[in-house]
Image (cartoon, helix red, strand yellow):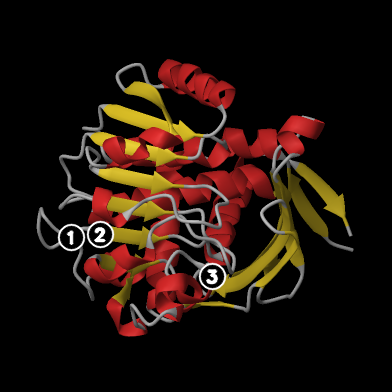
Amino acid sequence: MYKIRVLHSEDLVRLLTMKDVVAAVETAYEQYSNKEAGLFPVIVHEFEPGMREMDIKSGYLSGTGLAGLKLIGYVADNPDKRRIPAISGLVVVISIETGRPVGILDGMIITNIRTGAAGAIGAKYLARKDSENVLVVGSGAQGRAQVRGLLSVLPDIRRIWIAGRDGNKLATYVEEMSSEYVNVSFEAVSMNDLGSKAAKSDIIVTCTPAHEPFIRKEWIRPGTHINAVGADFPGKQEIDETLLPQVRLVADCRVQTLELGEMQTAYRKGLISENDVDEIGEIISGSAPGRESSDEITLFDATGMALQDIVTANLALTRASEQGIGSLVMM
């Protein structure tokens, strides 16, 4: 018999802050690029393209002594038809030393905050420090998490345009985020107005399940940074692939982004090669440069790595043990 700590969504909200998760995910990125952590093959399956899918991501970090996996289900019409989130799932972590599971955690909260942290890290190392205007495409949970991440590392941001296809969701987003960040201006934007807002943006964030690009090459001005978050499955795409050969490309995981991230189409068409892509962990460790000029266009392709889930889960489990939070289940 042994005990597993189970943490639900309310536990994780109490235990995790964006600032601390950013620091933990930075460590995971650096360890991965230094060969101190590893990923196993991603399992992805679309039951209905663009509507229903399942992802399993797994890996290990030697520094934490933990391995783990995340099982995520995505159903696009859950919020409208069933009044439940579009994304749900579990994170399971095991001890490398004993092989025994040590924790089971809600996967949605971890996914949202660690992906928001990933965007924060991309902007921290690649966006201009004086960035003020941000365009976010995607008004769901990840659209909120990405903004929380950005505002944790770039305090000069003053205006955020939020774009999407559902006017009611945009209005709710603006109301909620304006209350949370009273010193930042939030404005809803229709998809038809993307071009004018992209041309004025210092940072562009894409976090949708799109399979067709909606950010055009001709809209992007010098000095722009792009966080490409939505594409994490073969066939997904948010950005015109002809832009990519002209920008500085940085990945969370080089191999993974070329296979199923925003870079997949440009790579498949021969527009970019593996040698064109740095990893964010290499920049964090200093083995690759960050932004090199104020005019450089940069793109961070965040496909999502199990290592982010494992370090975030480890942070939550450590704090839960210290504070007596969660349920202990005998196995």
**Mark 1 or mark 2, earlier in chain:** 1
Q: Amino acid at mark 2?
A: Thr
Q: Residues within 10 Å of mark 2 (few under 14, many from 20)?
A: many
Q: Nearer the viewer, residue 170 or 66?
A: 170
In the image, taking residue 313 as reference, residue 328 lies left or right, namely: right
Q: Amino acid at mark 1?
A: Arg
In the image, taking residue 17 as reference, residue 57 lies left or right, namely: right
Q: Nearer the viewer, mark 1 or mark 2?
A: 2
- In the rendered image, the quadrant that contains the N terminus is bottom right
Residues under numbered marks 3 and 2 in contact, where contact means CB atoms less than 8 Å apart: no
Q: Nearer the viewer, mark 3 or mark 1?
A: 3
**Mark 3 or mark 2, earlier in chain:** 3
Q: Nearer the viewer, residue 5 or 159?
A: 159
Q: In the rendered image, which residue does mark 2 sit on?
A: 298
Q: In the rendered image, which residue does mark 1 sit on?
A: 291
Q: Amino acid at mark 3?
A: Leu
Corner quadrant of residue 29? bottom left
Disc 1 on helix, strand or loop? loop
Residue 260 bears which disc, if any? 3
